Image (tube, helix red, strand yellow):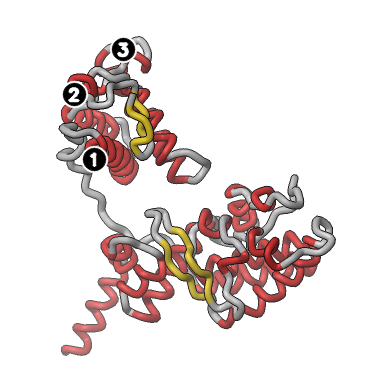
Amino acid sequence: MIKDMDGFSLDLDSKPSIRDIQTSPLPRVVESYIRYYASGNSHTARAKRLDLKHFMEFLCSLYGCSKIEKLKVSHWDYSSVQRFVDHALRKGESPSTVARRLATLKHMGRTLSEKVAGFVNPAREVKPPRIHAERPQAIEQQEVKVIKKKAVTRRKEKDSFIRMRNETIFNFLLDTGIRVDELRNLRMAQLDENLEWVENVRTKGRRYRNVYITSAMREQLKAYLEARAEVLKKFYAKLTKTQDRLLPLFISTYNAVAGKPESFLMGSKTIWRAINELSTDTPLHPHLLRHSYAVDLLESSNDVRLVAQALGHSDVRITMRYTQRKDEEIAKALEKSRKRAG
């Protein structure tokens, strides 16, 4: 048996042959991959699990298996992956969704090929569908002002800690551009004393970056931290600095237990609802605030690499999406250039 191959645990001999791999149950490989790379309730983890579920269901149909448990690794080859991609597109799935499903298969194949000598990634040569890159949707500055005004009004109507926390989260996401999972897992230990930086924020690629907090955000964050300290007095007779450093920056007291820092974590859905309830013209969600942060920073700096670093992107090509322009913007720029030339 091979154990702890960075997530893979297969019922094979210590030195498996290609035949051993090919005849192994595919669901076992998938389960091992999920345990290490797709556990938890993050959006990425759920998407990976769904991608693999769709793929195995397709393989069952393709090879006439009565149940998924009968699938072998040998069923997973270049041809089956290519046919899966074609099938998903014919079924009407968007190119971006199909590309994501393929990326999951490529990653699983690459991981297994790195751990088992001689295994070739079956999805390596399959090409993803071409996707027309559009600039992600962002909130216009005028609407941001309306949303902030709504948040202030809601807090005046009911001056509760939860509404203050939710308003602070909205402004914090817009100010820093961090992801939901990054925000919910922030600990007080990551805040510097001057509230200027959040240190060692873990990205999706398991890299770390420091995130800057602007001076405009610091006063509200300071007020939130004072209110947070008052709430925590109900759980700690005397909260020491060491104890506080282990607690989340943004807390939920629902089912919270003193001495268990993890019990104070907010759920991803709770954060989503906190943002969505501030919607005005545009239905809000946390990632939309990240897009808005990116677009605003790019327009003010004209520096794609700076934006890539601020967002924690490992590849600047990901950030290039924000440089895309609408047809109307191209037309307006051309008209302006022609008038200047004439």
Residue 291 screen position, x and y as percent: 44, 63
Label placed on residue 271: none
Tag 1, which secondary structure? Answer: helix
Query: How many residues crowd mark 1 within 10 Å: few (<14), some (14–19), many (20+)?
Result: few
Q: Give the mark, 1 or 3, whose residue is nearer the N terminus.
A: 3
Tell me the residue at 36%/23% (across/down). 27
Q: Position of residue 67 (x, y in %)?
A: 37, 13
The number of numbered badges drawn on the structure is: 3
Q: Residue at the spot x=29%, y=32% of the render?
A: 88
- Against 69, residue 80 (above or below) is below
Tell me which residue sits at (49%, 75%) in the image. 212
* Spatial CA span between label 1 and label 3: 29 Å
Residue wearing tag 1: 114
Viewer-closest of 320 and 115: 115
Amino acid carrying label 2: it is Ser
The residue identified by callout 2 is: 17
Displayed quadrant of residue 38: top left
* Label number found at residue 65: 3
Instruction: Give the residue type at disc 3.
Output: Cys
- Distance of label 2 from label 3 (alpha carbons): 25 Å
Q: Which image quadrant for residue 54?
A: top left
Circles 1 and 3: CB atoms closer than 8 Å: no
Q: Is residue 26 above or below residue 163?
A: above
